[in-house]
Image: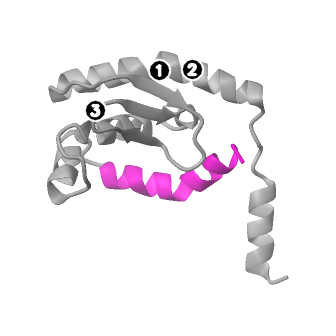
Amino acid sequence: MDQKNAENNTKHEEIKKLTPSEIRALAEEALNDIPPRVSRWADIMGLTYGRITIRNQKTRWASCSSKGNLNFNCLMMLMPENIKDYLVVHELCHRREMNHSKRFWATVEEYIPDYRDCEKWLKKNGESLMRRMW
């Protein structure tokens, strides 16, 4: 086994899997954290939304349906506050643009000027967080 594969294997072994009770606790925490966060940002942005659902997804942080319903991953509770805000704003921006066009990203940047740093954080840390569910 070469050094890179050994490092990857060690890295994966260090990831502590969440128990079902820990996942339930994160979901409960998310129910108390995310809806007020969405409400606050929606007011700031002048947007409306539908239902908010907390999920324990294995591949996605959040989503916005065409009806304006918002879904958020309970693993967000393991993230820094600014990353949670970024994900909420990102989904709320889909209420204006249901795509990832230049206009969409300009809207995100209007509210989260350092959104690129948030994206980098997710790229660097997201997989290891998601793997805690697998």
Q: What number is the disc on residue 67? A: 3
Which residue in the protein does label 1 denote? 33
In which image quadrant can residue 27 be found? top right
Give how far apart the Cα atoms at labels 2 and 1 are: 6 Å
Q: Is residue 125 magenta?
A: yes
- In the image, the segment drawn in magenta is 115-134
Percent from the top left, x then y, of residue 99?
25, 52
For marks 3 and 1, the one nearer the N-term is: 1
Q: Residue furthest front?
A: 67
Q: Amino acid at mark 3?
A: Lys
Q: Which disc is residue 29 wearing?
A: 2
Q: Is residue 80 left or right of residue 27?
A: left
Q: Mark 3 or mark 2, which is nearer the start of the sequence?
A: 2
- How packed mark 1 is, by other alpha carbons closer than 10 Å (few <14, some 14-19, many 20 or more), is some
Q: Is residue 44 left or right of residue 120?
A: left
Assess whether mark 3 and mark 2 are in contact (beta carbons under 8 angstroms).
no
- Left or right? Give the position of 131 relative to 54: right
User: Which residue is found at the position 85% from the left and 82% from the top?
Assistant: 1
Question: Viewer-nearest of labels 2 and 3?
Answer: 3
Number of other residues with Cα within 10 Å of mark 2, as a class: few under 14, some 14 to 19, many 20 or more: some
Scheme by which the image is coloured: one colour
The disc labelled 2 sits on which kind of residue? Answer: Glu
> Which residue is pictured at 81% across the width and 56% down the height?
13
Q: CA distance from mark 3 to mark 1?
A: 22 Å
Q: Tell me which residue sits at (80%, 84%) in the image.
A: 2
The chief SS type of the magenta part is helix
